[in-house]
Image (tube, rainbow, N blue to C red):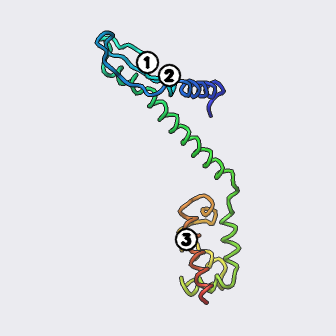
């Protein structure tokens, strides 16, 4: 998590960028050498804001020339990352269904037992044997894995989907 100072600095950078001139360009002036110009106000012509000395390397020239656009790009990327993080945090805050409990409840359903016998050959007379058969179909060792392993949860959802289709077609 960012500190209060980091948040304040980011706000300052955003404000500085928003207030800064735009439309940065490099021009060669015979009198002044190479200059970076910018439009201070949208309705005004561009003015020289930086004069580049002959000692200024192309790396620094390009850095200065593209600074405004690069900062805008980075601020947009940062905003998108923050949006995605907030989205993921909301998902984590939502209560997850207890799939292990759901599986235990559905395994008691008479229709589900018939489905498992018909589609997977798992008899339901012996409760422990039936539970072992369901775990084998789901490729899990314990129903608790349905709550902790996304792949196991997807297999359970797929099995439930096939059961519902079977039930609807019966």
Going 64% across and 81% down the picture, which residue do you hit?
112
Q: Residues within 10 Å of mark 2 (few under 14, many from 20)?
A: some
User: Alpha carbon of mark 2 to alpha carbon of mark 3: how far?
Assistant: 65 Å
Tell me which residue sits at (52%, 38%) in the image: 76
Q: Would residue 26 appear left or right of 128 to someone viewing this image? A: left
**Up-down: is 61 above or below 170?**
above
Instruction: Say above or below: 138 vs 85.
Output: below
Q: Nearer the viewer, residue 144 or 79?
A: 79
Q: State the mark number for residue 40.
A: 2
Question: How many numbered discs?
Answer: 3
Secondary structure state at the residue bearing disc 2: loop
How many neighbours does mark 3 have within 10 angstroms: few (below 14), some (14-19), or many (20 or more)? many
Give the mark nearest the N terminus, 3 or 1. Answer: 1
Q: What residue is disc 3 on?
A: 138
Q: Position of residue 155 (x, y in %)?
A: 54, 69
Q: Nearer the viewer, residue 14 or 96?
A: 14
On screen, residue 147 above or below 24? below
User: Residue 82 at x, y = what percent?
Assistant: 58, 40
């Amino acid at each position: 998590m960012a500190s209060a100072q980091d948040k304040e600095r980011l706000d300052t950078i955003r404000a500085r960028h928003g207030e800064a001139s735009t439309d940065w360009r490099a021009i060669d002036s015979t009198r002044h050498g190479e200059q970076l110009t910018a439009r201070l106000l949208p309705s005004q012509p561009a003015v020289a804001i930086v004069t580049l000395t002959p000692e200024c390397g192309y790396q620094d020239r390009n850095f200065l020339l593209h600074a405004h656009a690069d900062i805008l790009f980075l601020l947009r990327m940062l905003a998108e990352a923050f949006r995605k993080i907030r989205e993921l945090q909301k998902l984590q805050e939502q209560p997850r269904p207890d799939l292990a409990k759901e599986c235990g409840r559905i395994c008691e359903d008479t229709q589900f037992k018939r489905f498992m016998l018909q589609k997977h050959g798992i008899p339901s007379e012996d409760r422990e044997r039936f539970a072992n058969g369901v775990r084998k179909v789901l490729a899990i060792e314990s129903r608790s894995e349905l709550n902790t392993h996304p792949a196991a949860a997807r297999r359970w959802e797929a099995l439930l989907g096939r059961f519902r289709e079977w039930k609807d077609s019966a």
